[in-house]
Image (cartoon, grey):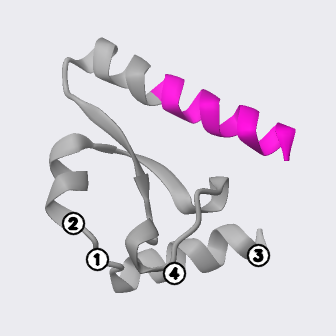
Amino acid sequence: PPAERKAIQELYLEANHQTETTGVDHHVDHIWPLSIGGEHRMFNLQILPAEENLSKKDTFREEDQALIIQRLFN
């Protein structure tokens, strides 16, 4: 949907802004990785420092599950 597409674009802009502001590289992370069935949707995206994002690789952690459930039902 167009509204979600716009929100996703804004999230990427915010990640870039955080990188510029802090000097620390930030990524938009798929909480539930695409490679294991996650979706490219707002409820599944978050901004993380690049180092943290790269360290989690393609894992879906227990705490990530709780975050996805919370976002889907709030």
> Is 49 rendered above or below residue 31?
above
Instruction: Specify which label sits upstream in the sequence, 4 or 3.
Output: 4
Q: Main secondary structure of the magenta part?
A: helix
Magenta span contains residue 5? yes
Look at the image and give the residue range highlighted in magenta. Answer: 1-14
Instruction: Specify which label sits upstream in the sequence, 3 or 2.
Output: 2
| Disc 1 + disc 4, Cβ < 8 Å | no
Left or right for 52, reference 16: left
Q: Nearer the viewer, residue 16 or 58?
A: 58
Instruction: Specify which label sits upstream in the sequence, 1 or 4.
Output: 1
> What secondary structure is found at the residue carrying circle 4?
helix
Marks 1 and 3: which is nearer the front?
Answer: 1
Give residue 62's position: percent from left, percent from top.
Answer: 37, 86
Quickly name the residue at label 2. Answer: 56
Give residue 51's position: percent from left, percent from top.
Answer: 15, 46
- Residue type at the position of mark 2: Lys
Marks 1 and 4: which is nearer the front?
Answer: 1
> What secondary structure is found at the residue carrying circle 3?
helix
Magenta span contains residue 57? no
- Residue type at the position of mark 1: Thr
Residue at 85% over, 47% down:
1
Left or right for 69, reference 2: left
Left or right for 18, reference 7: left
| Disc 1 + disc 2, Cβ < 8 Å | yes
Residue at 56% over, 62% down:
44
- Residue type at the position of mark 3: Phe
Quickly name the residue at label 1. Answer: 59
